Structure formats: structure tokens, C-alpha cells
Image (cartoon, helix red, strand yellow):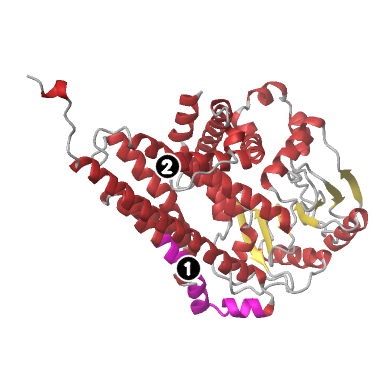
Amino acid sequence: MSGLHTWTGLLLGWVLYAMFLTGTVSYFKEELSQWMRPELARLVQPLDPAGVAQRVVDELRRVAPEATQLSIKLPDERSNTVYAFWRLPGGEGRRAFGDGHFDPVSGHRVQGRDTLGGDFFYRFHFQFYYMSPFWGRLLAGLAAMSMLIAIVAGVITHKKIFTDFFTFRWGKGQRSWLDAHNALSVFGLPFHLMITYTGLVTLMALYMPWSERAAIKTPAERQQLLAELSPFLPPAKPSGEAAPLASVETAVRQAQERWAQTHVGRVNVSNPGDATARIAVTRGDDGRVSMSPDYLEFDGVSGKLLSVHDQVGAAAETRGVMYALHLGRFSDLETRWLYFLASLMGTAMVGTGLVMWTVKRRQKLPDPERPYFGFRLVERLNIASIAGLSIAMTAFLWANRLLPVSMAGRSFWEIHVFFIVWGLALLHALVRPARSAWVEQLWAAAALLALVPVLNAATTQRPLWHSLASGDWVFAGVDLMCWALALLHAVLAIRTARHGARGHAKVESVRHAPVAVTTSEAAP
């Protein structure tokens, strides 16, 4: 069990660390997306969802008149725009869809900088980048399964794990790393188990598709399965008979009356302008610990309520609850911060485990100053994966502020900068001594994070002092969090430098110490 825990945690540990850290940030992806589009004004007062939905659908009918499917996500207290996507006839792959952000007040498409915002970290968290989403999700599933095995094996291995939770020996080298790893693991153990297992459940149809393929064969059965899992209405075959689209505003108001105070989350329209048109109004995620479909379906011509989809089977509901627990979208602000902190502890758990592997084995090396290749590889990957990832993620924010707003392919270049900087961090870790590389990269991350609010003040009209004075807590929160994380990285850099100096002095004292000779060794 000890060997299983060690190697399942190590071999994909660098992937797991990246998944955990980007997943942690994703709990505030809407707020981060707002910060990365500073041209868009924040919503001071809530808007009428019904009116917003009608304005945006009217605009979509104008900009994409041939679209066979429309889907709009209505704004809430965490977002200041309406995100919409639409399906185009005859297209393949990405060309089959269009998307954009729309002003909820005017309904027009917003003219902000092109960026994926916090959605980049969210997507990277489970499908990575520069590879097919299919293979990326398979890799994420393999890493999550390794994580689940490592957690169970770790609980079995550490017999005194709960006792050790109350013990922390500071400045004791390997013992301190083990104490930190144990404390972080035990404190968040229920969360770590939940987040890992539910992550596998979210993509279970990809990882284990055979039962579904064996049991569900007819189009009617597939349609029923889709209705259990998704609120998106697959467009029926158009009749070719033109018909005006019913009032979306009226449909949303009916949903508001039925759901009382519950937020309306999304509006989907299939075959707009055709006699077979349908409108679906979906309940929002806030306060619902389930991602199971909950929506009202209306006739898209007459506006008549056709059906109420608010119940699914037991298996689908179990999957919906696990999905919701993983994403945490039901959370209020306090619960979201608990998610963030628990996930941050999970990130630190993986990171301390990776570092502990090298700390534990360094003491057993014949010459700690000249380790073997495998040890050097793990050590360098640790530096680039932990400290280097912090630098890369911060560089992504810097690119958002420094790249020209009108630059072609701007959102892709933000991502390119992320990976270029991450690659440079790996190169730096390979060419520099390990202790120096750790300290230099941690200080670089601290400096870049500390300067983010300064960069924001220099490049936008929403500096920190203005955000605090106007109560713009999204912008103020991102700036203040960057300073908090800068302080954390600075403390880690200082501790690493001090520990490295003590370790180097100990190695030198052992190397130059006189060798004691026993009587038997001295005898001829």
C-alpha cells in the first residue's frame, strides 16, 4: 500500500497538481472573466430576466438568422454579460457554432477584448489544451483515478494519520514535509474523496460507455436518455413552414411565476422561425444541489406550455447531485470560499507529496550534490509544475492586460503566452541548480502577482482604489487576492532559501569532517 500510494501519487502527480490548481481558480471563473474584460461595466442593479432574454433573442435572430438552435445564459450577481451560442446549418466542428457576449441592457453584442477569461482555467482543468478534448479528458480521468487510489492507499498506509493531524514539527526537514502532507490530507479528506470521485462521475459516459451502448439502441431510447441528462432540446427536422417565434419574455415570466424566487438560468430555442419551434426555460443552479434538467418546454409559435421537466430517474438524479457537488455552482459566496480553500488544500496536498518524494530520497543518495538522473528529473519537474505553474497562470493575467485589444486571435495568444512562460520555467529549472531554481521561481511568481494590481491600474480605468471606493468587489477581490498569493509565494521563497542554506551547510560539514578510524581498522 505504501508503494502504491507513492507511485500513483508521483507518476501523474504533476498533472494532478495542474488540475487541482486550475480547478481551484475555476470556482471564481465568472469573477475572473469579469476582471479580464474591464471594458464591460458591472451591473449595479439586477435586471428583469424576461426582458433581457427577449432583447438578446431578438438580437440573435438579427445577427444569425439561419441558426437552428439558440442558447443564452442569463446574467446573475456573478456575471455582467449574457453569454450565447448558436448552431449554424451545414457547419462541421467549430464552424457549426457561433458564440459571443451580449449587453443585457441593450441586447447588442459587447465590444470588449477577446479573451476566454476564467473559462480557460476551467476547460484546462479537465481537458487541457493543444490536444483533442477526447484525449485530454481521458488523461484527466486517468489522473483522477490515480488520485482516488492514492487517497485510499494513503489512509491505509498511515495508521496514525488522524493522530498525526494534531502534530506539526516545524523546521524538521523530511518530518515537517510529512506532517504538512498529513495535516492537509486529513483536514480535507472528505472533500478530497468527494471531489475526486465526483470528477470521475461527470465524465463517466466517456470512461465506461459500454453499458449504455448495450442497453440503449433505438432513437426513442436515446431521446429519453438525453432528456434525463440535459435541458438542451435537439432541434427537430424543420417543417419548412415559416412561423413567427412566440414571445420569449412571456415564457420566462411563466417560469418565474412557477419557480417564485428561483433564478432563471438559461433559455434555449430550437428551430426559431419555423412551425416546429420550441422554447425551453431552464431553472438556475443557485440553491439546487443537482445538475439534473429542470425546465419548462413551450411551443415556439403559440407560446403554449407543452411540458414540465422537473423529475428524472433515480440514477440520473444521483448523477446530477454528484455533478453539482463537483462544480459547486449551487453555492452562495461563503460556501464558494469553503470550496476554494478546501481545494487549495488539496493542491497543497499534492504539491507537498511531490516535494516529499525528493526530500525523503535525497538523504539516501550517495552524493546529494550529484543525484542520479531519475531524481534530477522528478526534482526539475516539481519546480516547473509547482512554482512554474504559478508564474504561467500569472503571465496569463499579464497577457490579458498587455496584448493589444484589437489583436487578431487575441484570446489564443493569451493562452500561448501561458504555455510559453510555463515552458521557459521548465527550461530554467533544468539549467539552474535545484535550490536556486526553487527560490528564483517562487520570487518571480511573488513579484508578478504583486504587480498585477499595479498593471491593472496602469492599463484600465478601474484601479484598486477606485474599485474599493465604488464597491466593485470583483475587481478589488482579484487585486487583493493577487497580493495575498504574492505574500504566500514570498514566504515560501524565504523559507526555501533558509532551508536550502542550512541543508547545504550540513552537506559541506559532513563532506569535510575528519573520518573517525577505529582500532580494528587501523590494525594491519
In depth, the one of 34 and 151 nearer the eye is 151
Q: Nearer the viewer, mark 2 or mark 1?
A: 2
Where does the image place residue 448, in percent across and percent down from the top left?
A: 44, 65
Give the residue type at disc 2. Val
Q: Position of residue 424 (x, y in %)?
A: 34, 55
- Name which residue lies at 54% across and 50% down: 22
Mainly helix, strand or loop, the magenta region? helix
Q: Magenta residues, as a range?
A: 444-469
Query: Is residue 95 something one can see in this rendering?
Result: no
The residue that mark 2 highlights is: 355
Label 2 – label 1 distance at C-alpha: 25 Å
Residue at mark 1: 450
Give the residue furthest to the left: 524
Is the residue 92 above or below the residue 403 in the image?
above
Can residue 177 be seen from the camera position used here?
yes
Q: Which is more toward the observer, 350 or 494?
A: 494
The picture quadrant where one finds residue 112 is bottom right
Query: For the image shown, how many numbered marks are present on the structure?
Result: 2
